[in-house]
Amino acid sequence: MSALRISSIATRRFLRGTAVLAMALSLGACASGRQTTGSTANLSQSGKPIESLSGAELANAARSYGTAYEKNPKDKTIGVNYANVLLMSGRNDQALAVMQQVAIANPNDREVLAAYGKAQAGAGQLDQALETIRRAQTPDRPDWRLVSAEGAVLDQLGRSREARDRYNNALQIQPNEPSVLSNLGMSYVLSGDLKSGESYLRTAMAQPLADSRVRQNYALVIGLQGRFAEAEQIARQELMPQQADANVAYLRSMLSQQNAWKDLAQKDKKAGG
């Protein structure tokens, strides 16, 4: 059976509108590994990954990191964590402003450059983000997180073939890494090939270190194919009730235009028939 492919320009635009946010989540923690809120000066005692925090927890973390940042705006760890929290809160322009200041104070630090590139991507400065992420990379000792982040930016620029080359390079360095497999799957989703996207995301889900971002992406591609009950079940797996509710709310928001999705699918059938 051939892969399900979405042919119309209108449908691809719809997919980009729903899927690119999930791709952006996968840009997290490029050079520094998976960030946690308890990693800096005990500003948060939860110890949970930033991406799993509720809205109230994100607000508290932003206040704590903001206070620390005001006292020491040149500290790279505080700045990077503060910017991550701001990005997760949707405060992209502020996250970019924070990372601009941290990058001025730490111009040659790979972790800072990676976080700066991530903030640039979040603020829509994709070409600048690509340049910054590449500047953070060292060809003799390539960091798979940076390679994957470069791919994610290329995907958002519409350069999917180059992006997939980067993901495959990252997987050569870090085989079966779920965040890279997830990005690769979302690359196919963004191109309208939902079946290939589902296949890679299913493989990502099977990895021991797969996190809630991978689950959200997998649930999204399942939902985009009309399997809404299955998608909601996936979004709730292995999570605390509050986090599961947040994941389902995210999924529903991404699929809130399902009537538009159905209309576009019908247009594709008519065009192909």
Image: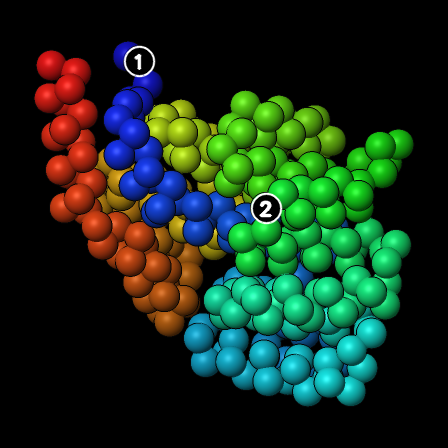
Quarter residue 101 falls in: bottom right
The residue at 38%/41% (across/down) is: 16
Q: Point out the image quarter for the C terminus.
A: top left
The residue at 42%/57% (across/down) is: 238
Number of residues whose C-alpha sits closer than 10 Å to that of mark 2, classed few (under 14), some (14–19) or many (20 or more): many
Q: Point out the image quarter for the N terminus.
A: top left
- The numbered mark at residue 233 is none
Apparent side of residue 260 relative to residue 177 in the rendered image (left or right) = left
SS label for mark 2: helix
- Say which residue label 1 marks: 2
Apparent side of residue 28 relative to residue 69 in the rendered image (left or right) = left
- The numbered mark at residue 126 is 2
Quarter residue 174 falls in: top right
Hey, what amino acid is under mark 1?
A: Ser
1 vs 2, front mark = 2
Q: Is residue 157 above or below residue 217?
A: above
Q: Is residue 56 above or below residue 233?
A: below
Residue placed most toward the observer, 158 or 50: 158
Whether residue 128 can be seen here? yes
Of callouts 1 and 2, the N-terminal one: 1
Q: Where in the figure is residue 40, as x and y percent of width and height? A: 74, 75
Q: Where in the figure is residue 32, as x and y percent of width and height? A: 74, 55
Number of residues whose C-alpha sits closer than 10 Å to that of mark 1, classed few (under 14), some (14–19) or many (20 or more): few
